[in-house]
Image (tube, helix red, strand yellow):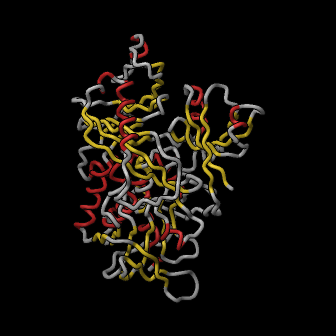
Amino acid sequence: MAGRLGRKFLAALVLGLGLRGLAYSTLAGTVSRHELGLERGARATAFAGPSMDSREGQAILILGGGVIGVSISYHLALRGIKTVVVDRAGIASCASGKAGGFLARSWNSGTPTDALSQKSFDMHEEVAKRLSLSSYRRLKCQSVAVDGTGSKPAGAKLKNLEWTDLGVRGSRLMGDESTIAQVHPKELCDAMWSYSEQQGSKLVKGVVEKLCYADREGERTISGVIVDGELLSADAVVLCMGPWSDVLQQAVPACGMLGVKYHSVLMRTGRVLNEAVFFAGLGDPEVYPRNNGDHYVTGFPDPPQVVAELPGNVEVRQEVCSRLVKTMQQVSSEMADAEVTTQQSCYLPFTRDSQPCMGKAPQHENVYVATGRDPKRAGAFLRIKSGTVPGRYKKPVKAKRTQVVRFTVESKPFGIAFDTVERDGDVYVVKVTPGSQAECAGIRVGDKLWSAGGRVIRGADQVMSLAQLTPPFKLTFQRDV
């Protein structure tokens, strides 16, 4: 059975790894390594296994009802293959239903996931047309530096901005309608699941307790999964449970997951805006206007952590939501009287090296993994593509204990030199100035920069944006110990 899953099954894994929560999520069909442009050594490569015909009685269990799991189910349904999706809280109950749905075609340029991202971006449009998604659209994106004064600057600084008009120090276009798009992740998930369900797939709501192994020689084979104390038999299992990794680690012990908690609010001003904004300053919030008049505002993430809160029962902290609203009122006169319609929070899943994991689990005959998130935070974007091609499994990094180190920058210069890993975009401390604020705070060479001013930092361009931050602001580092 596992051999017959092959290329068509794995082709269904890639659409799920990309919504900025969505970008890789949609890639459908069979995709070769050449088509993806992923050569030897890339983090995700296409799997060129044998084809599989739909057969009655086969049991494919997908553990996780987020955009990755639903995308896998949808793309298998397109090939006449039924699945069983298992989730504790239901379809798109966590980040996949609460993300911004922001899609950027070229933000992974120069990284191992570049070709995957671009293919997924194109596929989002194809899926949106096929499923008649009303929330899908193209829009612009600006980076806007603000100082929090609330004053209106000279008209020249506002010339190219649609709705940001207070405390603006400068702006830069990050993308236009040719490279930026958007979809409501809940609508996407619900539509894909509706199609899959119509083709005979089923949802089981329950707690996945453990994997059950068959007593066979050779590669390990899973015979089923215990859900709420009962055995569900399986010919193949896909593990895509986001930051909740207890079951994943039963199959792949070295693949521990972390969650980064983000809060978001929906604000309504009375008109549809067409410009997403990434702010530099005031904690670096982000705004994704939707085509129904809602404006999705997020920012101020918690440090990465092993997630203890349960799916569907994640605490929403009022003080963070209030800070998001207050910040919007400091940067836009249009937001001053906006109605706050929704306050929510969710965990975005990250592997410990911040690269998505897709493919067949090592030493397993019938277990596949699809989890993690785009390192440049075009999340939903990669997730839809994971529905179609997870390829060979990325060799997991040996598990290490991670210490979180925080440093509040009170003034500039603060005494740190950074460098980036070209392949991954990770940012590391390469020099700490003796006697500087950083040395006094205990920052060390080798510490990995995670966030600055509340925004996750990846790549050289985002490191350069640190110069725009006005003290005081916080830097968060990860240190392997």
Residue extending furthest toward the top:
154
- Give the quadrant of the N terminus: bottom left
69 is higher (above) or lower (below) than 412: below
Residue 466 vs residue 15: left or right? Answer: right
- Give the quadrant of the C terminus: bottom right
Residue 239 location, x and y as percent? 45, 67
Q: Nearer the viewer, residue 116 or 160?
A: 160
Residue 217 location, x and y as percent? 57, 88
Tell me where residue 27 sits by quadrant: bottom left
Residue 129 vs residue 481: left or right? Answer: left
Residue 44 location, x and y as percent? 55, 57
Tell me where residue 388 sits by quadrant: bottom left
Residue at (63% x, 47% y) in the render:
423
195 is higher (above) or lower (below) than 479: below
Residue at (44% x, 50% y) in the render:
18
Residue 443 location, x and y as percent? 69, 41
Q: Nearer the viewer, residue 416 or 384?
A: 416
